[in-house]
Structures are given as structure tokens and as C-alpha cells.
Image (spheres, grey):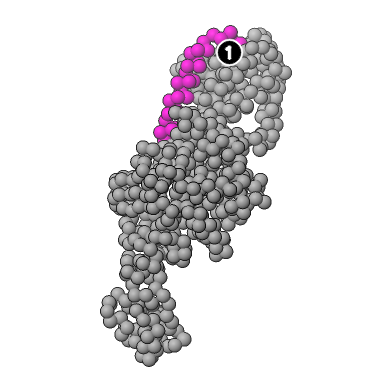
């Protein structure tokens, strides 16, 4: 057990070393993406949306938690799809790693741990930027960071599960365009889905991980913790299930 | 410095001079049998070569040894531990140099060594020291901070070899370490492996190059079609199965009578392929004199010692690089 934990930590460390040497390339886009979203959707579009009292006159405030959840989702997803796929198939670096005492299950869990870290960095920067757009500087920020990590966990598990089964890198566009994009649009980030779509579609949306992530984020940041245990439990269970699947598939793929 | 620690056998190793014991080991993929019941041992301090063409089962055998391919049958023990059960501990005592450079292209040369040392459980300080020692061994000190993708093919190979040594392994497994390298780079790599050999390392290497096997290996297993077809020292194997010399000639006019006349003891000693003939003989000088008397073209006929390529052809009926 301690051997596994140490090995997982070292796989994480490898990624941290790579990031240490090039974090500054990614940070600027990471910083400006929320700025643009908050200005465009919140300050710009939000003016018209909020006029007349919808969203309590604060559309910007309404979309902030959901956008943070989406940022965490994106951070974990890129890391566990394209990046892991390249290491698995083109770089073949896992072949070298599993020839050492580190096992393929350690590699898989280490990648998940790293993806959570990226989600926290990515979502955390977004969270910091929202301080300039009305998010209060108080203890709820810590809760938000924990929530970001949970969102990262769920999506890193899902990304790894998908990566462990796809034969070619081209299929990731299906994952991003046909799953993550609709998740982004229909998870109550921009409007309450249940008010605009038939109940059956709203119910489907409610069971998707991003919808639960957005609920969790709102619960932590705005609704005084209401319902957060249920959402957190959902994301935890979701992550564990897909991570177990990913470990099993990666083992089948690498040990043969 | 760190590299030389490898020469110090652990007490455990002294009491178990057999490093690997494979008994009737096999690997099947569906209906395809990659390794078909091989039995062999690797002894402490020896360089054992697996010689055979592509598809002979060399890589699969090695992958089973380094715990990334589970055997379909037979028994396998490394360092007295059962394969599979103690995978982590077994891998901790191995160094693996794969056929394809699977270096981490996103890390620097030094960090490739450091992270592999960390994977083996070395502390940060130990990993740093080990990396410096191996940079010197691989003559890559000047490239320490360079990203791997900027290295030449030969440098990558040296780094891959050095990476296999980070854990002071009790057994180094090298899968075709020089395949695809240009001659000069091969020579450098051979020097490095000679170096390891002198320090008493135990090596298991596969190759399909005769000269490499003859030069580096103390003992050979010749593999073909997933089986071991012969075993012994390079010279001993040749002497046991073949007369010591070969008279080779290029025929003019297609008359092979003088050559054919030499192969009196064993019809297999005469081999003809197109207009080229080879005859295995005991006395090279005498045989050469006789074929020349018989009318062979002196400019196109010569004598050479029998080699492993000849042996392989004799044993399997086909060449090593087909």
C-alpha cells in the first residue's frame, strides 16, 4: 500500500517536473480565459439578460460558479485525454515506467492525481480572477477549492476511462464536441435547464457530472452549503467508478 | 561511482547464483504461440545472449522476465522469487533497456535518469548522485540539461542504456540494444557493455547480429519459432554442430563438382544458393587446394571460419534476417 502511494506520488512528480519547466506558457491563457468570459458573458450579455430583474439582476454572479466548475472540468479533461494518450501511444513512456517497480495502476492513479492538480490550478486561477468581478474574499473560497478538486477528480476519471478505450487520437473530438460542449451549455451554468426544456431532458442533464459540479459550486459559493453533500457524494462515486474502470482497462492494454 | 556499486554482489546473490530460472515457459496470444515452452537459466555474472530472427520469441521472453507480460504456462523465478507474485520487488532489481528508445521526451537528459531513479525508490539526493554518475558513464555530461528530443540517435541509445542502470540492477535485460544503429554507434555501445561485463554485471541480451553475440556473450540460446533450438558458448555451439571452416565460391558456368566433392561426410555440408556455394570442411587449407585443383576460380574462392550465421542456417533451415 505504501509502495503504491509512493509510486503514485512519483508519477505525479514526473508531471510536476514537466509543468515546472513550462508553466508560464500556459498561465497567460489560463488567466485571460476567465477575464474574457466574465467580461463577454457576464458584463456584456449579462446587462441585457439581467435587465428587468431576471437572475435577481445579477447575471454575472449567476454564471460565476458554473464557469469555475467548467474550468476545472477542462483542466482535468485535457490532461487525461490528449496528454495521456500521447504518453501512452506516441511517447511510449509508460512502457518505460512500468519496467520499474511502478505498476500500471500506479501510473493511472498518478495521472489522475496530476489531472486533479491541473484542475485546481486552472479552476483556482479562474476563482481568483472572479474576485475582481464580485466574488467575496472569505472562507467560502476554501470550500470552492475543495469543490474544484472534486470536479477535477470526476473528470480526470472519466477522461482516463475514455482514453483507456479509444484506439486513435481523432476520437477525442467526439468526447469534447459531443459530450463536454453540450455539458457546458446545458448544465445550468448559463440558465436553468429545467425551465426551458422538457422534464425528460432536464432529468438527463441533472445526472451528468458537470451539472452536479455546477450545483456543488453554487452550493458552496452562494447557497450556504445547501445540497453540497449529495453533489460531492455523486462526484466522488462517479470518479471512483470510472477510475476503477480506467485502471482495469489500462492494465489490459499494457500488461499482455 | 554509483555504477561501480553494481559489482558488489549482495549476500542474497552469492547464495543464489541462479538469477533467472525459467521452466517450460510459454506465451500464447489466442491461437498464436509466441514462446513455446522454453527452459533456461541465467547465472550470476554471465552475459547470456538470445539469438534469433524477428518473431523468434526473444522480446516476449524478455517481457515475461521484466513482468509486463504474464506467462501462459510454465514456471518463472527471478532472484528466487516467483514471477507475478513479487512483480514490484523483482522489477526493483532489474534494469531494462528496451528495443525502442522510450525516453521521456518532455524531460531533460538528467531528469530522465533522476525520475527513473525515483521510480526505483531512491531518495532525491541519491537520485541526483546516481544521475551524475550515469551521465558520466554515458558520456552525456555536456547534454545534461538538454531535452531528450534534441539528442542524436546514438546519444539516445546511450541514455537508454544508462537509464537501465539506475537501480544498480542484479540483472540487466537488453532487447536488441544495437538494432538500427550505425556501425560507429554500435561500437561505442559495445564498449559500454564490455565495461559493464568487466564490472561483473549479469546481462541478458537479445540480438540478431552474429558479431555482437560472438563478441559480447558468454553463452547463447538460439531461438527460432518460440523455441530454444540450441544452447552453448558461441564457439562451442559452432564446433559441436559444424566443421570449423567454410570454403566459399562463386561458380562460373554452373559446375559445382569440385565443391560437391568436398562434402563427403555429411550432405548438409554442401550448400548452394544460385551461383554461390559454401562447403563446410575440417581442413580449410587442404580443401581450398583441392577445389582450385578441381578447376574453381581462384579469385572467387576463399576460406573463412564457420560462424553463428552458418550455425543458425544449419539448425533452422533459414537465415537470421529474413
- Specify the subunit that label 1 lies on: A
Please indicate, yes or no, whether residue A29 appears anywhere in the rendered image. Answer: no
Q: Locate residue B261, reporting x and y percent.
A: 31, 85
Query: Which residue is located at x 46 percent, y 31 percent?
Result: A4
Quadrant of the image containing the C terminus of chain B: bottom left
User: What is the quadrant of residue B154 in the picture?
Assistant: bottom right
Please indicate, yes or no, whether residue B77 appears anywhere in the rendered image. Answer: yes
Query: Which residue is located at x 56 percent, y 22 percent?
Result: A149
Q: Nearer the viewer, residue B28 or A12?
A: A12
Q: Locate residue A221, reporting x and y percent.
A: 61, 13
User: What is the quadrant of residue B274 in the picture?
Assistant: bottom left
Span shown in magenta? A220-249
Query: Which residue is located at x 58 percent, y 21 percent?
Result: A148
Q: Secondary structure at mark 1?
A: helix
Picture layout, residue A194 above or below residue B41: above
Q: Nearer the viewer, residue A250 or A179?
A: A250
Give the labeled residue for mark 1: A220
What secondary structure prevails in the magenta region?
Answer: helix
Query: Which residue is located at x 58 percent, y 40 percent?
Result: B127
Picture layout, residue A236 above or below residue B126: above
Report the label total: 1
| Label 1 packing within 10 angstroms: few (<14), some (14-19), many (20+) | many
Q: Locate residue A26, reporting x and y percent.
A: 66, 34
Amino acid at each position: 500500500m505504501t509502495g503504491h502511494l509512493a509510486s503514485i506520488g512519483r508519477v505525479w512528480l514526473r508531471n510536476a517536473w514537466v509543468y515546472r519547466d513550462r508553466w508560464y506558457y500556459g498561465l497567460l491563457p489560463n488567466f485571460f480565459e476567465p477575464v474574457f468570459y466574465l467580461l463577454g458573458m457576464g458584463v456584456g450579455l449579462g446587462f441585457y439578460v439581467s435587465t428587468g430583474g431576471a437572475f435577481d439582476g445579477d447575471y454575472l454572479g449567476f454564471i460565476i460558479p458554473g464557469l469555475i466548475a467548467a474550468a476545472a472540468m477542462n483542466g482535468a479533461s485535457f490532461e487525461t485525454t490528449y496528454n495521456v494518450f500521447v504518453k501512452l501511444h506516441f511517447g511510449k513512456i509508460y512502457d518505460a515506467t512500468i519496467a520499474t517497480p511502478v505498476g500500471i495502476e500506479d501510473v493511472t492513479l498518478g495521472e489522475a492525481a496530476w489531472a486533479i492538480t491541473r484542475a485546481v490550478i486552472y479552476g483556482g486561477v479562474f476563482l481568483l480572477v472572479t474576485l475582481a468581478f464580485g466574488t467575496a474574499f472569505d472562507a467560502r473560497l476554501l470550500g470552492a477549492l475543495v469543490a474544484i478538486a472534486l470536479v477535477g477528480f470526476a473528470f480526470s476519471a472519466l477522461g482516463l476511462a475514455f482514453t483507456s478505450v479509444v484506439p486513435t487520437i481523432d476520437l477525442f473530438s467526439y468526447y469534447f464536441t459531443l459530450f463536454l460542449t453540450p455539458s457546458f451549455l446545458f448544465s445550468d451554468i448559463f440558465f436553468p435547464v429545467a425551465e426551458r426544456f422538457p422534464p425528460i431532458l432536464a432529468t438527463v442533464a441533472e445526472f451528468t457530472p458537470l451539472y452536479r459540479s455546477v450545483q456543488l459550486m453554487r452550493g458552496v459559493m452562494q447557497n450556504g452549503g445547501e445540497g453540497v453533500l449529495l453533489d460531492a457524494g455523486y462526484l466522488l462515486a462517479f470518479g471512483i467508478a470510472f477510475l476503477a474502470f480506467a485502471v482495469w482497462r489500462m492494465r489490459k492494454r499494457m500488461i499482455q | 561511482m554509483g555504477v561501480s556499486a553494481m559489482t558488489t554482489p549482495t549476500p542474497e546473490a552469492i547464495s543464489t547464483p541462479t538469477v533467472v530460472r525459467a521452466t517450460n515457459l510459454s506465451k500464447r496470444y489466442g491461437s498464436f504461440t509466441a514462446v513455446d515452452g522454453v527452459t533456461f537459466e541465467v547465472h550470476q555474472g554471465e552475459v547470456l545472449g538470445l539469438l534469433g530472427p524477428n518473431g523468434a520469441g526473444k522480446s516476449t521472453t524478455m517481457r515475461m522476465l521484466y513482468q509486463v507480460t504474464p506467462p501462459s504456462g510454465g514456471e518463472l523465478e527471478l532472484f528466487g522469487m516467483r514471477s507475478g507474485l513479487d512483480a514490484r520487488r523483482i522489477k526493483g532489481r532489474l534494469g531494462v533497456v528496451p528495443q525502442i528508445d522510450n525516453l521521456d521526451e518532455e524531460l531533460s537528459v538528467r531528469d530522465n535518469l533522476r525520475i527513473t531513479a525515483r521510480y526505483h525508490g531512491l531518495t532525491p539526493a541519491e537520485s541526483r548522485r546516481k544521475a551524475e554518475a550515469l551521465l558520466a558513464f554515458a558520456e552525456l555530461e555536456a547534454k545534461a540539461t538538454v531535452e531528450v528530443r534534441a539528442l542524436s540517435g546514438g546519444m539516445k541509445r546511450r541514455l537508454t542504456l544508462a537509464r537501465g542502470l539506475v537501480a544498480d540492477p542484479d540483472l540487466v535485460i537488453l532487447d536488441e540494444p544495437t538494432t538500427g544503429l550505425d556501425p560507429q554507434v554500435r561500437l561505442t555501445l559495445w564498449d559500454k557493455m564490455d565495461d559493464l561485463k568487466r564490472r561483473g554485471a549479469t546481462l541478458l541480451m537479445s540480438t540478431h547480429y552474429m558479431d555482437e553475440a560472438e563478441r559480447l556473450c558468454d553463452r547463447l540460446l538460439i531461438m527460432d519459432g518460440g523455441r530454444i533450438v540450441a544452447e552453448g558458448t558461441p564457439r562451442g555451439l559452432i564446433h559441436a554442430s559444424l566443421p570449423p571452416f567454410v570454403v566459399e565460391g562463386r561458380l562460373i558456368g554452373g559446375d559445382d563438382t569440385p565443391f560437391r566433392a568436398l562434402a563427403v561426410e555429411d550432405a548438409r555440408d554442401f550448400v548452394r544458393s544460385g551461383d554461390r556455394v559454401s562447403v563446410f570442411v575440417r581442413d580449410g587449407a587442404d580443401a581450398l587446394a583441392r577445389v582450385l585443383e578441381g578447376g574453381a576460380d581462384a579469385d572467387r574462392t576463399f576460406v573463412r571460419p564457420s560462424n553463428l550465421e552458418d550455425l543458425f542456417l544449419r539448425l533452422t533451415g533459414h537465415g537470421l534476417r529474413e
